[in-house]
Structure formats: C-alpha cells, structure tokens
Amino acid sequence: GTVLHYDAVLVRAAKSPVWRVAEFQAVIQFPDRMDLWDQFEEVYQNDGEDAARAFYAERKADMDAGAIVNWPAIQPLIFLMLERASDHDSFATEYQNKPINEASPFKDLTFWVLQQPDLIHFGAIDPSLGKKGHGRDPSAILVGGFNRLHGTMDLLEASIRRRLPDIIISDVIAMQRQYRCLLWFVEAVQFQEFLRTTLMATAARQGVGISAVPVTPIADKDLRIERLQPPVAGGLIRLNKTQQTLIDQLQQWPNADHDDGPDCLDMLWQHTLEYAGGATAGAGGGINTAANSSQQRLGEYRL
C-alpha cells in the first residue's frame, strides 16, 4: 500500500520482524544533474508546464543521465518530475513512500555539496548508553566544520547507529585522525562520563590527541531540538544529502522513533557557537564568541 502518514499502521507493521517488507519508490535513483532539474522547476513555477517541457526537451540527455524509475512505460521521468515540481511533500508521500510530517519545523533543509577549506572542526558525541540490547537508542557522532567569517556550520559527518562503547571510541578516534577536531563535546550523564575519560586515554595511547569536554544537558530535550529550527531554516546549519538517518530524524521530529541525532546536533551547534571564536575573531566579520584572553577556559577545563 501507499504510506500516507509517517506513523501509519502499515509503517508500524513493517517494523515487525515477522513481515518480509519490500518498499517501492517511483524514482529509484534521481538524475545526476539535479541542478538542471532545479532550473526546470523554476521554469515550471514561473512560465508553466509547456515551457518546462520545452526546457527538458532541449537538455533531455543531460537531465535523464543517472536516473532510474520504477515504471518508465507508465510513469516516465518527465511525468514524475513534473509531479515533484508541483508539490514536493505530496510527491514524497504518494510516489516515494516517504511522508513528511507537515507540521515539522525541519521540512526545509539546506545542503552543502563541496567541502569548504579553512573550516574549524568540532565534534559531538551522544553515547546513548542508558539501555541494553535491542532497545538501546542509537549513538550519535557528529563532526561539523564552522566558518567563522559567515557564521555557518557544514555537517561533515553524521554517524547514527547502535554500537557498543568500544566501537564508539574507535569511530571517534578514526574521525579525529581525519578531521583533527579542536574540541569534542560529550554528553556526560551518569556513567557516560567514564566513556569520555576512557576515550581520551585510549586515543592518547594510539598517539591521537582528543580534548573531550563534558556536557550536562539542562533544558528539556524537546526544547533543545526545537531551538535548532531558526539556524536550520536560515541555512546556518547545512547538511549533506548522504546523511539520510539524521535527515529523517529531523523531518519526522517529534514523532520519529529516535531523536538522538537532532539532540546531538543541538549540542554541537550551541557549543561550536560558544567556542569557535578567539582573540582575533570578528576582525573580518566573523563571530567572536570565546573569551579574549591568553588562557581561555571551558568550564573547569583550560583550552
């Protein structure tokens, strides 16, 4: 059947291991040149369907490249993309079986394509160690690159999955080798603090320096996630389209099965804003958020 709601009975039943589930989508793989399809949508919205079809006819080879559709004889690519241009939400629901909560504050996301140079890297970890077995929430490990000149953050890594503490540590060390994050922010509730100290000690034995700062959440989780809406809607936080798990958790919040990704994203954004500055930040229009002193401190920790 067609999934018309993100929490439909069919969706719930499909999560049961007793069912063998096959998901069908009208567009199995979107075209390579989505930039041309963005222009196509602009023509469609401004000049109508005939003008959009003419635009497509002139560039058909480029606009078809890479696309795979489920039923090309009945629903060719041009038909499906016209439906998509008409209403993205309806297309996601009726053709892609990916309904979006219409009341979600994170319907509209901004994406980065090419990684920018000269970004300051920070990381955040939500270990989610409070449960055991299959009921355990997924852990979230995020890495963001902050542009002090424009005040934007590109999310470079969004690893959200269930894993044991030793796997969390090894994954973080691998990301630190790649990105050399200035600081890692670690949710330190109950025995998660032990993971933070173990992470730094294990990394040091492997020759990797990690400064992991404990973060104890104070505000309600829903309020923390909700305050992400302005920077996300304003394009200050940019995701990558490969980060589908986080995208789904954002767009289906507050009714998603898990919200560890958005919660970790808030932790990363809030603390990056606070500590991405420095003694000379702001001189070129950047954000000056850290203390202007020779010995900057984060809580009880010297930076």
Image (spheres, rainbow, N blue to C red):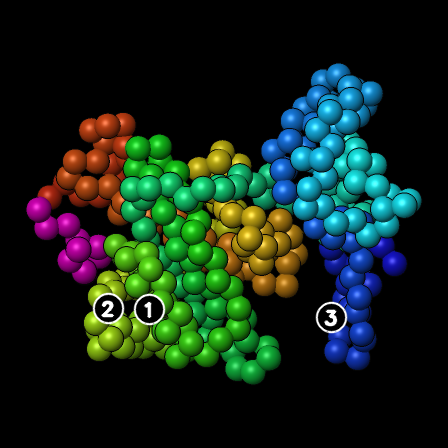
Q: Determine which quarter of the picture holds residue 35.
A: top right
- Look at 36% across and 63% down and name the residue there: 175
The mark nearer the N terminus, 3 or 2, is: 3
> Furthest residue to the right?
74
- Look at 39% across and 79% down and name the residue there: 166
| Quadrant (top left/top right/bottom left/bottom right) for the N terminus | bottom right
Q: Label 2 belongs to which residue?
A: 208
Q: Determine which quarter of the picture holds residue 42.
A: top right
Image location of residue 258, percent across then percent down: 59, 63
The total number of labels drawn is 3
User: What number is the disc on residue 287?
Assistant: none
Q: Label 1 belongs to which residue?
A: 173
Label 1–label 2 contact, CB within 8 A: yes
- Badge 3 marks a residue whose secondary structure is loop
Image location of residue 72, percent across then percent down: 85, 46
- Badge 1 marks a residue whose secondary structure is helix
From mark 3 to mark 2, how far is it between C-alphas? 40 Å
- Look at 51% across and 48% down and name the residue there: 240
Magenta stretch, main secondary structure class: loop
Q: Nearer the viewer, residue 164 or 39?
A: 39
